[in-house]
Image (cartoon, grey):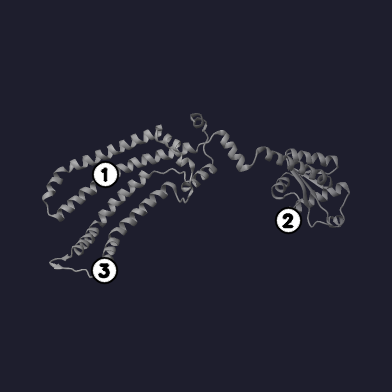
Amino acid sequence: MADDVADKTEAPTPRRRAEAREKGQVARSADLTAAVSLLAGMVILNFLGPAVLRNLVEFMRNLLGYQGEDAVLIASMGQFGQFAASVLLRTVAPITIALMLAAALVAMLQVGLLFTFHPLQPSLRKINPITGFGRIFSIQSVVKMLISVFKVLLIGSVAFLTVRSRLEQIISITGLYYWKLLGESSELLFLLGIRLGLVLLVLAIIDYLYQRHRHEQGLKMTKQEVKEEMRRMEGDPLVRERRRRVARQLALQRMQYAVPNADVVVTNPTELAIAIRYDPQTMSAPRVVAKGADHLAKRIREIAIEHGVPIIERRPLAQALYKTVDVGEQIPPAFYKAVAEILAYVYELSGKYPVGTRAATG
């Protein structure tokens, strides 16, 4: 296992990342969601606390059946249920919705939009007792336990220091009127919640960074895995080479037939070669019957020399035709004049004019 980890030195491919994401294997920290939810809950209660308190007081007064000195009789359990539901909705719904939005926002910032049921699929590895015992007694489990103990000690220390710094205030509020007692207690709990939330947030950010590092390390691939991945994405290199070889052979076979029947070969002069043929009886414009670069250009010139096809050097025209015209296509109107001049020159030298061409050029 150690050798496998040591061999994984290559960065993961996009396909590897996509497959891991489809399986729900993403870097995320549950502690970060908990910390943000705690801080959001404290802030929400700080703003909505008075309204929540008023709703609870109203609910308790009606529950106990008193409103000032007059008894309030509840006509039926149905009415009481409706009243309790409305109070509960006004009290709990805003807080619950805000906490859900905060948790969803944190989760989206960590992993983005992700919907997958792959982690819920049954797997024998999840219920294998040997694998389970291995996870429990692994070094990783021991490290997690030590980190959890450290978190508990740190949070406990922050809570202890916060309470001790307000110890005199806590002792003094025991004799206060209950409204004043409630206000002082709320302020202390808010301070304690914010401090604990900030500590948890720092720990959660560190945990998230560690989870991302661990996730990246887990996605790394060996050189052999990268090769296999590229083979799956692009096909077997041997098959690709065989296809290219067959394509070259077919191109050479077409050239063996097309170049001898061409009227002229336009060159760059050595890098490019374009064979052009024009038959006024069957073509409305000259056509590129063969083209090539480097060794293919050399082969086109050799075939042209063997069969007496004129070779004309026109650098700009050769470059333009090679880039814009495919084999078998007619030349664009923008090149009519330049190609017509070359064909007229070739016909004049050879004394061979296609039917209808001499009258047009003469």
Q: CA distance from mark 3 to mark 2?
A: 88 Å
Is residue 171 among what the camera can see?
A: yes
| Tag of residue 195 | 1
Q: CA distance from mark 2 to mark 1?
A: 77 Å
| Tag of residue 38 | none
Residue shown at the point (20%, 50%) measured from the top left: 187
Query: Is residue 145 left or right of 284 when viewed as pictured?
Result: left
Callout in the foreground (3, 2): 3
- Disc 2 crowd rating (10 Å Cα; few below 14, some 14-19, many 20+) is few
- Residue under label 3, please give it: 79
**Which residue is at the front of the view, 323 or 36?**
36
Pinpoint residue 231: horizontal percent, then vertical percent: 62, 39
Task: Say whether disc 3 or disc 2 marks the residue closer to the N-terminus.
Answer: 3
- Disc 1 crowd rating (10 Å Cα; few below 14, some 14-19, many 20+) is some
Q: Amino acid at mark 1?
A: Arg
**Which residue is at the front of the view, 194 or 173?**
173
